[in-house]
Amino acid sequence: MPYISTTDSERQQMLKTIGVQSFEELIEAIPEKLRLKEPLHLDPALSELEITRLINEKTCRNVCVQSANSFLGAGLYDHFIPAAVEAIISRPEFLTAYTPYQAEVSQGTLQYIYEYQTMICELTGMEIANASMYDGATATAEAILMAIRKNRLSKTVLAGTLHPEFLKVIRCYTEGIGVELVIIPAKDGVTDLTVLRDAVDDKTACVVIQTPNFYGNLEEVFAIDEIVHKHEKCLLVAAVDPISLAIFNAPSEYNADIVVGEGQALGNALNMGGPLFGFFASRLDMARSMPGRIVGATLDVEGKKAYALTLQAREQHIRREKATSNICSNEALCALAATVYMSLMGKAGLQEVATQCFHKAHYLANEISKLSGLSMAYPDVPFFKEFVINTSIPASKIIEKLLCKGIYPGLDMTAYGNSKQLMIAVTEKKSVKDLDDFVCALKEAANV
Amino acid sequence: MSKTIFELSSPGRKGYTLPKCDLPTSFKKDIPENYKQYLRKTPARLPECSEIDVMRHFIELSHKNHFIEKGLYPLGSCTMKYNPKINEAMARHTCFANIHPYQPLCTLQGALEIMYELQKDLSEISGMAQVTLQPVAGAHGEFTGLKIMHAYHLAQGNHHKTKIIMPDSAHGTNPASCTLAGFEVIELKSKEDGRVDVEQLKQIVNEETAGFMLTNPNTLGLFETQIEEIASIIHSVDGLMYMDGANLNALMGIVQPGKIGFDVMHYNLHKTFSTPHGGGGPGSGPVGVVEKLVQYLPVPLIGKKEDGYYLDASHNDTAIPKTHTFFGNFAILLRAYVYIKMQGAIGLRKVSENAIINANYLKNKLEPCFHIEHMEHCMHEFVADGTKQKKQFGVSTLDIAKRLLDKGFHAPTIYFPLIIPEALMIEPTETESLQSLDDFATAMIEIANEAENNPELLHEAPLTTPVRRVDDVRAVKQLEIKFPI
């Protein structure tokens, strides 16, 4: 049997040592009638060679973004990942370690989480970050729950420009526990500030925005700050694209109180949408009500610098039903990928990535705007690396036509209320040729 | 002590290359006026390092970790089995690593097929009707399962069902997940033999009971013999039975939870199905349910039609909202798929058999030195109690755990379950050889002797680890959660 080290004769010897005749004696506590009478109905076992063949056969029925010209984003982005990231995260020392509960033999994991927390604080301008959450959506939902805990208020105002999948997850985390959700409609691709102003009151625990928002547009964060913080208790929760923070406002600049987001763009592959990781940061005064693991620097008994999990009194293994969250496993290895990525790219590299995304996206938007039958959906609104275009024929038709040319032109917005819109994401990985080829193909496809 | 990456930084040093931004010169790369207010005022002080700096730094950190390939990792209820390398090789295939969930479905058929088959295989292993692959951790699965239970009760018009009963031996995530899902927790004291007190359960069950949450085998490594009776008590008030699947490694091919009274369960693919723990994730916590609850699973499920695999959202009206942005941790699902296909039915049964034999063998070896409360045969794990060492020699379970680190082993899960005061919860898993079990037993016996003859040594332990015993009180009192750049 694969991965079982004991031989039949060793097993016999072990059973003898235990003092039983057969394995069955060991499971006498399981009532006979509850036991399976026949083997499970599963495919026959494969050898390593056979599973490799099977998997290779299946990969042939996927067409990855590497062999296509892809403009898909919508919360999951194909950024360049240096080879060194993979070299580190595939090391068994990191890969097969457990949660760092025994600090003395987990200093490697603990220190990189500490460095990760520092980098997230730097990017967001916040004072404390946790060790990561499941994804951007659950991080946002947990941010709302934290704001509610902190404020003892139940009303939450959400920008309608949040990622629709985030909204679904938020609904799952907040329904049935007395949270009132108010959703602010979008106007011209950003949050309608007039409606927002009317919706926020002294009973509002928090306002949640995303910038760049689902449509790729930058929200009017300074005006939002003013609206939110006019109310003493109300907290501003900002969900952000970490790459955008290299060139656009750190959320601290518009006084965000809790900052969350999807971290995948930092050194993690697409992987069909998982694993992802959520980052979570806030002001220091909320440290004791944060969800998730936090690593702190400390000393060992000899006075040597060391790291340990800290503020554990918040967590489920100590506080049980009174814990700040039920989260146990997070996405540590994805956070490691992000830490290595940010270490390699550094201050200048992340800026260059963000700048290239910005210029290439704007170049493409500009070229597409020149085509007949296509236009920018929100021409006057600032955006980062993603934008929505209006099409004169259904977006699904364009997608179908461009697929034959090996192009994924972007997200069909039918599911989000408009069948004649495409959302297009551009990362630094696109060359001018990629962009021009796309424009060329669009020109043909958009009008017929 | 290792420097931090920030201390290795030097202004202007680079660890990357990027192609030039090759836009035509006719395109003006100015930032338009209306963007200016959004530009960052001061740059994030990320480290500036060369690739070799970065590699050396993280390799140096890696040397300070315990990991499965280094030595036995007997954490109870964590199932730290060997993680086969073929899983990794398959998951890193570019046609899996670089696919986007919003691609046209015709370009994702291989991935969808794997998810579809995994739904089926996990259903078969547990005897459940259907599985959602969305949850990405055990606790995330618990939350998803509890929301499903909540939705079921609401649909029956049972708004008063607000309480979940669980034994006092439950994992901490169980009560925490209940709170998150809007339930109230009723804790049930375990019987002398460590199992559910059925008589007591009968007393506290009432119309407000939404369900019962149970790990089986329980956290003492004991199968809940009266599971049928427990289920019938809960079902008699239209409550639902939730199984925490943390200990599924003891049951594969032996018992199907869905056929012995459980209605909902989560699987921990990072435990039972050999996917790596990653230092604390990413994991995967799919949830399986019986037929009457399928309509509440979050959409989409992966469906199969004549022309291929598709995203099935047909029960959207009754489903709970999504619990993950996309479809869960696909790359982890893929590893578990490879594992299941390589084991087959016979292999999975052998996994559980050997997990049980290994645990009982180790238990037998340790019994002369450590008190083990429940003397019957265990399933895949058991709990030793260090109370004797504590009382007689002043050596705590923490001391014993730290001394194990000196001997090249990871410590067991300690001080859990809470009902055993000086608990050492030990799960060797099926992948350990006879020699490695013997080595671990020898180390434990040595430690028991040291406790008696040289307790000071244990108070001082660990002596040989990268750092000595870490002051975690200081970590709280003098909170320093980021490097002062």
Image: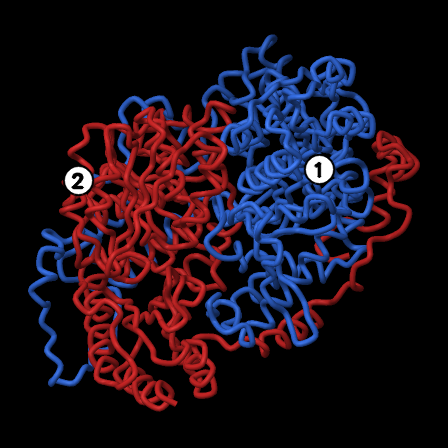
**Snapshot quadrant of residue B289:** top right
Is label 2 in a helix, a strand or a loop?
Answer: helix
User: In the image shown, does A445 or A279 lie closer to the viewer?
Assistant: A445
Residue type at numbered disc 1: Asp
**Snapshot quadrant of residue A380:** bottom left
Q: Is residue A107 above or below residue A267?
A: above
User: In the image shown, does B337 or A98 lie closer to the viewer?
Assistant: B337
Is residue B95 in view from this perspective? yes
User: In the image shown, does A248 or B397 lie closer to the viewer?
Assistant: A248
In the picture of the structure, the residue carrying the numbered disc 2 is A227
The N terminus of chain A lies in quadrant: bottom right
Residue at the image position 68 percent from the left and 38 percent from the top: B247
**Quick one: which chain is blue?**
B
Is label 1 in a helix, a strand or a loop?
Answer: helix
- Report in which chain the residue with disc 2 lies: A
User: Residue B438 has which mark?
Assistant: 1
Residue type at numbered disc 2: Ile
